[in-house]
Structure formats: structure tokens, C-alpha cells
Image (cartoon, rainbow, N blue to C red):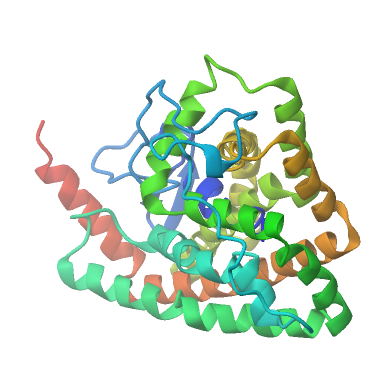
Amino acid sequence: MRRLLALLGIAAVAALATPAHALEVYRWIEGATVVYSDQPPQSGGVVLTSLPGREPLPVVIAPDAPPADAPPVEAAPAETAAVPPPPEPDVIVRAGSATVDEILELSGMRPQLPGIVRALGAEYLPPAGQLSEHDTALIGQIVARHFAPARLYAIIRDDFRRRVDQKGLDSMAVWFRSPIGRRITALEIAASRPEVAPKIGAFAAGLKTSPAPASRLELVQRLDWVTGTSHEATELGLSIAGSVARAAAASAPAERRARVGLVERRVEEMRGQMAALVGQNVLAQMLYIYGPLSDAELKEYVDFLASPPGRAYGRTAHNALLHVVREVADRTALEVLRAVPPQRWVSAQKAAGATAPR
């Protein structure tokens, strides 16, 4: 369940959905090389994109999530509740032996996967107006083919089946079928919806003037440590950045091709910059998402994730998702730059610079 937050529920929401004003990573093309930097290029006529590629969230000191010690979400007024009420106790839950599909459903992996896939795939799309309509549509088709939720889910499910036996599935199901387990999954799924992103941004800004209680912050830090969320979010973000850099190097003429080691070093240079800010955003997002839980309930969740069944779920889900994302990312980037060569991106950028108002 929360392994998706440790995987990409926050992955796409921490690494790729990090507010642009919080971490600007510029990406542009110089010749046949894709350049990543925290500083904009000095040359003119370059169309910039940022990692992540989404509109900045509003900076508003008006958090609308309940405070950490607020009553359970059932008792929260509709206009202030961070997320919809959790499932009613009479929600049908399987009894008996658990299945992989059930675990991935109850944990939130399957429901959140389409949003994760869309966020990752969007990193390959050019900014509006940068390329011709034909090239833009062509790239969109390539991305949609590789980042197909149903196909990626099938790979993750098969990987899960290979790594977890029936005893392991049944031990995970004890938590995921429980009322508190289902309630926490409902909170995570609700917070992953696109329309909630501005609320999370406003809440994070509000923490600057209204910090979380020390006891709640400690629990959230433990949650991040147990799940490895910040690390995994960074890895997923770097997977996309690295795929584009490697594909650009492979697409360049032999005499201008960057050495593999140099490409990887450039990507690694982003890790330190990204990791620190991702970590800050992850903690803010966790404080928001789990706001309706009491400290005791959040501790119960942390304890599950630190238990053998919780660690087994987290390790398996993380490995499956990261493996499939890395594999799909490299293939997508290579096909995108074969269909629309770097030289065409450079020409479009120069044309944009020549026609830009002075």
C-alpha cells in the first residue's frame, strides 16, 4: 500500500511532481548532447524545460489539511477534510488465501499506477510549441505505447508472483484487509489525484510558518526511513533523466558521441541536488496525506512497514516498479530520439530563439 508512496505514489509526486519553484533542473540540447543543470544555459535561443515538467504549485499560506492531531477523518468537516472518508466497514474484502492481484489492489499499487505512468511519460513530451505538430504527435504515440498502464501492471504482477509465495501473500493480507490498512490506502489514493496537488503545495508552504509537532515529524521521518521513499523517489526521477541522456549519446554521430562514463557522471551530479529537495517535499507530502491519522495510528502503520510482511511487500514492490520503469524509460527515450533526432530539436530551438520577442 504505502509502498506506492515509497515507490511512486510519491515518486511521481516527489521526484516528478516536486514544485518547479522548489527544484529547477534545466534540460536542453547542445549538439547531440542532452544537458541537465540547475543553472539555465547562457546561450540564446534555447527552449527550456524543467524537471519535473509541470506548472508551479501556488505558494499560499493556507494549509487545508487537518492538523496532525485532528480527529479521524470520519469526524472532520467536509470542507476541511484532506481526503474523502475512508471505506465503510462493510466494504467487501476477500477471506481465505490472498492473491497477488488482491494485494496490489488493496495496497493502492494498481489504482495509482495510471497516474504514475502518466507523470513519468510526460517527461518525454516537448513543451507546447517547441516541435511541429507532427513531431509532437509522434512522440506522444511512442510514449503512450511504452507507458501503457495495463502492460506495466502485468509486468509488475508477474514479478510479484515470482518473488512472493502464498505464505508471504497471506501475511501481507492481514494488514491490507484490516480496517486501518484499508483506511490508509484510501488516504493515499485520494491524495494522489491531480486536483489535490495544489492543496499539498499550499500545505507545504504553510509548514514554514506552522511547523508540524515534533512527535508527528519524528513519526513521518521514521516512515520515510522505513520505506526509503526519498531515496526511491530520487532513483525514479534519475531513471528518466538518465534514459534521455543515454539515448541522446547513442543517437549522436560516432565522432561526436559522449563517452558512457561521462553521460552517467552528468546524471549522477544531479543526485545530490535532487535528493535533498526531494526529501523535504516527501516529508511535507507525508504530513499532509496522513494528517487525519492519530499518532498512534501512524505508529501502527510504521510498525507494519518495519515488520517482516511489510518489508517483504516494500522490497518486492520497489524492485518490480523500479525495474520496469528503468527498462521502459531507456526504450522510450531511444525510440523518441530516433523518431525525432536531436538535430531536429536543435533546429526547432534555434527557430524559437530567432522568433522570440526581444
- Residue 151 visible (yes or no): yes
Q: Is residue 65 above or below residue 242?
A: above
User: Foreground residue, 74 or 20?
Assistant: 74
On the rendered structure, is 272 left or right of 44? Answer: right
User: Foreground residue, 229 or 195?
Assistant: 195
Identify the residue at image location x=60%, y=72%.
Answer: 105
Q: Is residue 160 above or below residue 253?
A: below
Residue 252 in picture, x, y percent from top left: 44, 67
For residue 293, what is the image quadrant? top right
Residue 317 in picture, x, y percent from top left: 71, 68
On the rendered structure, is 61 left or right of 87? Answer: left
Residue 266 in picture, x, y percent from top left: 59, 48
Which quarter of the rendering shows the N terminus?
bottom right
- How many numbered discs, if any? 0
For residue 216, what is the image quadrant? top right
- Residue 32 visible (yes or no): no
User: Foreground residue, 358 or 276?
Assistant: 276
Residue 59 in picture, x, y percent from top left: 38, 26
Identify the residue at image location x=81%, y=79%.
Answer: 163
Q: Is residue 321 above or below residue 44?
A: below
Identify the residue at image location x=36%, y=48%.
Answer: 195
Which quarter of the rendering shows the C terminus?
top left
Q: Residue furthest front?
A: 90
Identify the residue at image location x=41%, y=20%.
Answer: 61
